[in-house]
């Protein structure tokens, strides 16, 4: 177990260096073409744009570390904020309770994903596909296909776009993202939860044979992912001051792309938290930069796809080299 | 195994829906239809076959989308007209306005129910042309609404003249800017015909009548609020002296509004929208959105059903019914002729 730990630490360090360099190159390149790209306001814009996808990516990286996947993160995000909004508008509960309720809804969806894969034996892809459909449908049913507004709470929008400690232009959403990243990192590197997650990912049978109840830990992993989706729902709905029931499909792919660019292997058994965050930053820096350069939307998609290939191919080559040694 | 899984999924989602939807049985049914479509394709086929009795009062309506308020308004108009005329309608649309294949499946399933008439807004007119021609050959009236269907297939089209709608927005933009300035456009689709025409109509009018105005950037945000917000923010960063943003639907407009708000550019950069929603109405009322174009979705749904019934009764119908478009802003949004066209 200790060996796994040190190995992953070394690997994580190397991987991080590569993508940090990629991010810096990207920032400098765009900055040279248009200096406004590196202005304080635009950097904050990029960070704010990362907040939702970053939270989803941090969440989805947990199931990915176990060799699983959760493709319901986008719609669970939407469902949790729709439920929170309905609790606020239809039931008239205090906003604080509604926020907690929304995050619990996310956690519960994650719990069900874990339960379906661990106890019912559904492949995680199928379990979360089902959850994606269910939450997509329920978001529309519960909201009656209308946006759910939080306008009755004056400060709700400040949760995401209020200024942190009054610093001009420094959004709270960025602090939420950093806070959740730190939390995720602590769980990953300092607790047995993180170690068991990686252990399950590298060999679930061996882990089970060593006396660990892998089913329960897996459920825990998916529940944690659900909590992150719930947090993303909070940030998103606060930014828009409303829960948009039709949003969500497609967001899971951006999140998975960020996790993969960050250096998480879809085979499981290794993982990186900071890398995931940087992966999400790379995607939004790229999107923002291409938009500022006024490159057409169609081309933007293609470019991001190419970047995904390059980063993963790079990562594969590095792994092969390591194996050959 | 696969079938059992699908069946389990459908049952589970139905159960969950009946749990959540108990307060509003009507809408729960509608949305259950929409949500259950995906996993239940095989089973709906059977049900459809079982249901297909001699039912001549049934009109199938298939839209570009379903969940958006705009489509809900079209549905409302269609339902009202159907009730008055003694007809029954089904109203369906895919979750995203890009899912051509899903829409084709919906059409095929609807045909299984032997509708008396079909009203359709096709995402891709080519992909449904053959199916609709077959139905038309059987003597079933085909009514295009909104984006419509191909000219050969349809007996009548009820929609907004989107080029004219875009031009109307351009006229007001030109006046607001006094004939000089920089404009950026946030569209919601590069492929759906009326979305393209809204941008095209706007561009053409500006180029023709306002030589002092420059269109500096056009980007597309899929009508997604968050994407459109990011686009608006990058636009004001790239072009610091931007004067106005024109957006082609509700999602783009509210998204851009949020983006400008986050960037602190409300008031500095004017915003013109399209369609309406509770959030848009509030921002228009406060002047933060200078104005917007509204169509008449309720009237459109009504016109589609009414034309279908006329055709069924053998009456003559004009080949194009323009359901109109109107400019609204803080000054006229409560007027008698405008207020009913604005929906939440």
Image (spheres, rainbow, N blue to C red):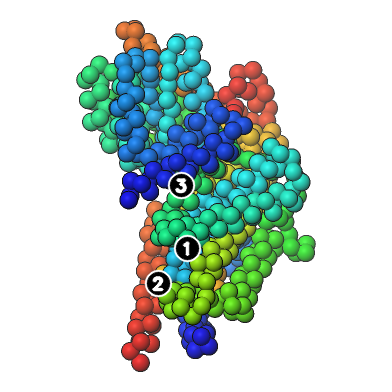
Q: Quadrant of residue B51?
A: top left
Say what secondary structure mark 1 lies in.
Answer: helix
Residue in the picture at 34% in, 36% down: B43
Instruction: Residue under label 2, please give it.
Output: A267
Is A192 on the left or on the right of B308, as rendered?
A: right
Residue in the picture at 78% in, 62% down: A166
Whether A89 is drawn above or below B314: the answer is below
Precedes in sequence: disc 2 or disc 1: 1
Disc 3 packing (10 Å; few <14; some 14–19; many ≥20): many
- Where residue B297 sits in the image (x, y, percent)? 50, 25
Precedes in sequence: disc 3 or disc 1: 1
Viewer-closest of B24 and A249: B24
- Where residue A7 sits in the image (x, y, percent)? 48, 87
Q: Quadrant of residue B134?
A: top left
Query: Residue A133, labelled with which disc?
Result: 3
Q: CA distance from mark 2 to mark 3?
A: 25 Å
Q: Residue furthest bottom?
A: A325
């Amino acid at each position: 177990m200790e060996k796994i730990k040190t190995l992953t630490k070394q690997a994580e360090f190397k991987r991080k260096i590569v993508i940090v360099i990629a991010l810096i190159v990207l920032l400098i390149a765009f900055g040279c073409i248009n200096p406004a790209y590196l202005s304080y306001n635009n950097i904050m814009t990029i960070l704010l744009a990362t907040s939702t996808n970053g939270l989803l990516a941090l969440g989805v990286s947990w199931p990915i570390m176990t060799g699983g996947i959760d493709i319901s993160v986008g719609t669970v995000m939407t469902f949790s904020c729709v439920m929170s909004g309905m609790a606020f508008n239809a039931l008239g509960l205090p906003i604080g309770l509604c926020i907690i309720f929304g995050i619990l809804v996310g956690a519960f969806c994650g719990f069900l994903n874990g339960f379906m894969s661990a106890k019912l034996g559904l492949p995680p892809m199928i379990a979360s596909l089902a959850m994606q459909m269910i939450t997509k449908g329920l978001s529309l049913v519960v909201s009656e296909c209308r946006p759910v507004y939080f306008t009755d709470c004056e400060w709700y929008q400040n949760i995401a776009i209020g200024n942190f400690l009054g610093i001009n232009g420094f959004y709270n959403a960025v602090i939420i993202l950093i806070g959740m990243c730190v939390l995720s990192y602590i769980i990953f590197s300092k607790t047995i939860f993180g170690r068991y997650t990686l252990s399950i990912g590298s060999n679930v049978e061996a882990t089970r044979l060593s006396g660990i109840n892998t089913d329960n830990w897996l459920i825990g992993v998916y529940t944690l992912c659900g909590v992150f989706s719930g947090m993303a729902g909070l940030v998103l709905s606060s930014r828009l001051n409303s829960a948009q029931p039709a949003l969500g499909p497609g967001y899971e792919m951006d999140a998975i792309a960020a996790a993969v660019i960050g250096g998480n292997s879809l085979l499981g058994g290794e993982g990186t938290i900071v890398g995931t965050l940087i992966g999400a930053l790379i995607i939004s820096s790229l999107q923002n930069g291409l938009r500022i350069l006024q490159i057409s939307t169609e081309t933007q998609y293609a470019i991001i796809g190419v970047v995904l290939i390059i980063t993963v191919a790079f990562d594969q080559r590095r792994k092969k080299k390591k194996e050959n040694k | 195994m696969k079938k059992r899984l699908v069946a389990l999924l459908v049952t589970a989602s139905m159960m969950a829906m009946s749990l959540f939807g108990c307060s509003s049985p009507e809408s729960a049914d509608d949305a259950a239809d929409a949500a259950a479509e995906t996993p239940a394709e095989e089973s709906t086929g059977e049900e459809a076959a079982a249901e297909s009795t001699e039912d001549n009062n049934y009109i199938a309506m298939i839209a570009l989308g379903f969940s958006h308020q705009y489509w809900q308004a079209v549905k409302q108009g269609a339902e009202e007209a159907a009730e008055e005329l003694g007809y029954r309608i089904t109203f369906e649309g895919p979750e995203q306005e890009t899912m051509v294949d899903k829409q084709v499946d919906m059409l095929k399933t609807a045909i299984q129910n032997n509708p008396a008439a079909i009203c359709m807004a096709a995402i891709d007119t080519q992909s449904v042309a053959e199916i609709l021609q077959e139905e038309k050959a059987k003597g079933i009236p085909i009514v295009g609404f909104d984006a419509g269907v191909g000219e050969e297939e349809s007996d009548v089209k009820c929609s907004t003249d989107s080029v004219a709608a875009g031009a109307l927005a351009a006229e007001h933009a030109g006046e607001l800017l006094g004939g000089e300035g920089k404009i950026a456009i946030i569209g919601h689709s590069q492929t759906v015909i009326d979305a393209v025409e809204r941008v095209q109509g706007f561009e053409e009018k500006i180029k023709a009548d306002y030589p002092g105005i420059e269109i500096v950037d056009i980007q597309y945000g899929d009508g997604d609020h968050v994407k459109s917000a990011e686009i608006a923010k990058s636009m004001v960063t790239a072009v610091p002296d931007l004067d106005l943003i024109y957006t082609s639907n509700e999602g783009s407009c509210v998204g851009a509004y949020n983006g400008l708000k986050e960037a602190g550019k409300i008031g500095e950069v004017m915003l013109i929208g399209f369609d309406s929603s509770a959030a848009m109405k509030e921002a228009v009322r406060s002047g933060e959105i200078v104005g917007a174009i509204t169509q008449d979705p309720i009237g459109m749904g009504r016109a589609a059903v009414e034309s279908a019934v006329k055709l069924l009764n053998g009456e003559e119908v004009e080949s194009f019914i323009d359901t109109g478009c109107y400019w609204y802003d803080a000054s006229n949004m409560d007027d008698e002729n405008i207020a009913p066209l604005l929906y939440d």
